[in-house]
Amino acid sequence: MNGKDLLDIMGQVDDDLILKTEVKPEDKAVISPVPARKAPVRRPWIGVVAGLCAAAVVCIGFAAWKTNWFGLVHEPTNTMDISTTEPTPESTMMTTTPPESTAAWTPTPTPTPAPTEVTTLPEESTDLTRPHQSIDPDQVLYAPDIKTGNVPDDFESPATDEIQMPASLEEEFSKPENRDKYFAVSINISHFACVDEYLSGHKPYIPQEELIEKFADEIRTEAHEEIDRLTGLGYDIYLLPSYENEKDPYCVFDGHEDQYRYHIYHGYTVSGYMTGEQLASFRTNSAYGYRFTWDSKETHIDKSEI
Amino acid sequence: MPTIDDNSIVDLYLQRDESAITQTSGKYGARLRHISYGITSSHETSEECENDTYMEAWKRIPPHEPRTYLLPFLIRIIRSISINRCVSDSRLKRKAEISELSAEMEQCIPSSLSVEKELEAKLLAEAISRFLHNQSEEKCTVFMRRYFYLDTAASIAKRYGYKESAVRMMLLRMRNDLRAYLEKEEIL
């Protein structure tokens, strides 16, 4: 019996199975009802402007106090009075400057703004180094079903330095009782710095063959470095192989029998287990965009299965 | 044209009344074409398959009397005709995909298995049905859409809001589960 015979045998399954899975011509695609939070576009200059404004206010306030602009006579009676009634410029800055965020890894030493828009907790409370072996299977949280854990496809791919994740995942890992629990997740990492940089100067159209030929090695290197960076941060993630049989002309291939592939526009997907804490303080590389999927038991691919 | 119930349509076939085909076409034509187009990816071919389906139904009724299962009866016919067209007509671009699907099916049922008799094929189909009835609705739907309606993984993912990799992984696991089930049932 060959595969064609088997397909024919599939044609003999029960009537009710045929009818309940039929898609009528008028049926529209089932769109995931799960709302996804699209991360706001980061504007690093806002922090700078806010800081300058705060500094200006403090300077003006300080000048006003020194020159008694408002005619307020204030003679301190003792040093305690000064310290309790007049804020020093330094203390005002402390309250207006955004709290120091988790440091971002970037390919250049240029200081970057806070890398994630998800709520971050203090660094010392984040345990990023737990090894894979310590994961208690009972502590892994899976999405209740496939749709719940997806960012709907009608969302555009994340921009660089942007995180997208389904609202259900964020809701769950934000619960205090889930901070230490593991979530089964996949992360699609899109953009390649070398391709983005090249395309910005060669619009509107570059044949993909040219891109593949020119950047294959750099794309592989970028992917390896990013995966190394993430695992170096203690994230228990691994690159997923492709299950496509056909060669995609938009992909750079890698690994034994080319089982890994990096799509020049859609990137690649890693999978793994991350704690609620790690998800809340996820550290991006500003060159890439990150789309999280909260995997269900049916869809999660464990490293042992690869 | 007012539609009549399936029982009456089958009566027309049994009476060799050619309006049976008109009634069938009016009631189910669009759905049958849609299924065929899903397999062949060709409007022209799907229309031809639809016409062939009515001819085949005309030949099979009688002796069949699908009074309570006319639509599944027709779907089976058009599916089979459409697959055969894909295999025989090299112009159809889905020919390669049918080969891919066949290879996937062989993963869960070894091709060395000899099912020569129709009865044994029927037993295998019944076992697959039992297996699918024991699956969750979403898994059953994905499996049927892939191996009965021959949808691509990408189109299943798009329609049901899954990731394509999730669909492929689900299918891979289900093929493994099906193989294990058939071995347990001593069908393999």
Image: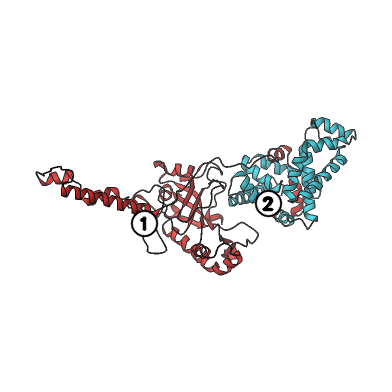
- Percent x, y for residue A281? 40, 51
Q: Nearer the viewer, residue A78 or B16?
A: A78
Circle 1 residue = A103
Circle 2 residue = B108
Which element carries disc 2, helix, strand or loop? helix
Q: Is residue B106 left or right of residue A197?
A: right
Label 1 chain ID: A
Kind of residue sitting beneath label 1: Ala
Q: Nearer the viewer, residue A234 or A279?
A: A279
| Marks 1 and 2 belong to one chain | no
Above or below: residue A275 compared with residue B26: below
Q: Any idea which chain is the cyan one in this picture?
A: B
Label 2 chain ID: B
Q: Is residue B46 left or right of residue A20?
A: right
Q: In the rendered structure, find residue B77 and report the number of the disc placed on it.
A: none
Kind of residue sitting beneath label 2: Cys
Above or below: residue A175 compared with residue B110: above
Q: Any idea which chain is the red one in this picture?
A: A
Identify the residue at the far right of this view. Answer: B16
